[in-house]
Amino acid sequence: METKTRPLGMVILFLAGSPGFADPSAARVLSISQVLQRAENVSPALQAAADRERSEQENLTILKSFYYPSLSLEAIDSYGFSGSGKELGIGGLMGSPYRSGPAAGVTSSVALLDLGRRSHLEAARQELAAAQDETRIERVRLDQFALQTFLEAARFQGQQNAAREMAAEIERVQKEVDRFVQTGQRSVVEKLLVQDQTTDARMSEAAFHERYEVALERVALLTGWPAQSIGCPDPQSLSEKGWILQPAAEASPLLVEAAAEAAAAHAEVSGYSAQNWPKITATASVGAMDQSRVIDKKEYSGGFGLTLPLFAGYRISGEIRRARALASAKDGDLTAARMTVDELNAQYDETINASRVELDYLKDERDVARKAFALAKQRYLAFEGALVDVREALRNLSRVETEIINVQVDLLLAAGSKALINGGRIS
C-alpha cells in the first residue's frame, strides 16, 4: 500500500483553484476533514512511513526471486596449473577442472526444495503487512494531533465569540447606566462598576483573540496554508453526529500491526527450524571450450545436489531459540496492544458519556441564565432591581457559555480520537 503525498509548495495553486479557497487573502472557515486531509498530504513523517513500506515491498520481491532459476553468462581463460580457477566463481562447463583453454557459456541453477526459504518469504509478507499498518498508525497519530490542534483553535474562537457577545451586552447596559447617571437617577459608582466590567470583558475577548491567532499559526504549520487565509469554526456549530465517521474496515491499526509482527516472528521460527531439513538444488550449463583434459569434451552439463546439515557449531539451534524468544516477545506486544486499545476506549467512553450528560445540563442552565439576565436587565431599567443583579447574571451567563464550549470540544476530541484509534476515518 502506497501513500501519495502532495508537495507543500502547491499551497498557492491549491488556494487559488479550490472552490472553498477562491480568494487566498480572505480567511475561510476550515472543516476538520480539510485539515486532516491536508495534514496527511504534506506530512514528512507519513512520507517516511510510506518509504519504509516500499522498502519492505522490495525486500519481499528479493525473497520471491529465489524461487526463480538463476541464469548467467560466463567466460573464462586461465594459465599455469590447470583447474585452479575455482575462486573466480565460474560454474558449469566453464568451471570444470577438465577444461583447458578459454571457455564460454550459460549457467543456470534453481533450488528445488528449501523449506526455510518458504518460511522466510512468509515472514517477509507479514513484515510488509506490519509496515503497511505502521503507516496507518502514523496516519492515526497525525490525524489525532491535527484534530486536537484544530479543536483547540476552535475552542479559542468560541471563547472569543462568547466574550465578544458578553462585552456587547455590557456595553448596552453601560449606555443605559450613563444615561441614568447624567439624569441623576443612578450614582457614579454604578457607572464605574459597569465600566470595569466592560473593560474586563474586552480584555477577555482580546486575550482569547491572541490565543486564537497563535492556534491558527499551529494549524497553518500543520497544513501549509497561510494563517491569514484560514479560520476555524465556533465549536458550538460543530455536532458530534454531524461528523461522518467512516466505519472501520479492520480492527485498530495498533492491534493489526502487532498481530502482523507476531505472525512474522513465528514464521521466522519456522524458517530457522527448516535449516535442519535437507536442501535440493539443480544446476545446468551449456557452452563451448577450447579443449578438455582426461575426459571427452561435452557442450552441456547438469546435476542435482542434496545438502543435509549435520553440525553447524550450534548456530542453527541458537538462531531457533533466538527466534522463539522474539516470537514470544511479539506475542506479549500483541497482548499489551489489546490492553492499550481497551484502556484508551474506556477513557474515551468516560469522557464522551460524561460530556454528553454535562452538555444536557449546561444547555438547560444556559436557558435559565439567559432568562435571568434578561429579567435582571429589565428590572434594573425599570428601577425595580439593583445593578449587582445584572452583573452577576452576566457573569453566570459567561461562565455557562465558556463551560459549554470547553465540554463540547472535549466531547468532539474524545469522539474523534476513539474513531481514529479503532480504525475509523473522519470525513
Image (spheres, rainbow, N blue to C red):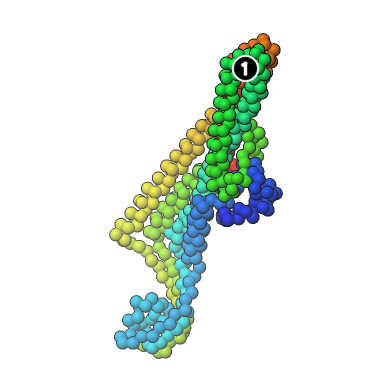
The residue lying at 45 percent from left, 84 percent from top is 104
Q: Secondary structure at mark 1?
A: helix
Q: What amino acid does circle 1 point to?
A: Val
Can you say whether 177 is above or below 280 in the image?
above
Quadrant of the frame with the C terminus: top right
On the image, which quarter does residue 365 sit in?
top right
Can you say whether 152 is above or below 221 in the image?
above
Quadrant of the frame with the N terminus: bottom right
Q: Can residue 168 be seen in the rendering of this structure?
A: yes
Query: Where does residue 228 sit, x and y in percent of width and height?
Result: 60, 45
Who is closer to the viewer here, 312 or 421? 421
Query: Where does residue 13 sit, x and y in percent of width and height?
Result: 64, 55
Q: Seen from this angle, which residue lies furthest bottom?
A: 291
The residue lying at 48 percent from left, 71 percent from top is 70
Who is closer to the viewer here, 95 or 201? 201
Query: Where does residue 33 sit, x and y in percent of width and height?
Result: 62, 43
Q: Seen from this angle, which residue lies furthest left?
A: 313
Q: Residues within 10 Å of mark 1 (few under 14, many from 20)?
A: many
Can you say whether 72 is above or below 1 in the image?
below
The residue lying at 50 percent from left, 61 percent from top is 58
In the picture of the structure, the residue carrying the numbered disc 1 is 390
Q: Can residue 365 be seen in the rendering of this structure?
A: no
Query: Where does residue 142 sit, x and y in percent of width and height?
Result: 53, 45
Q: Is residue 151 rendered to the left or right of residue 96?
A: right
The residue lying at 48 percent from left, 60 percent from top is 59
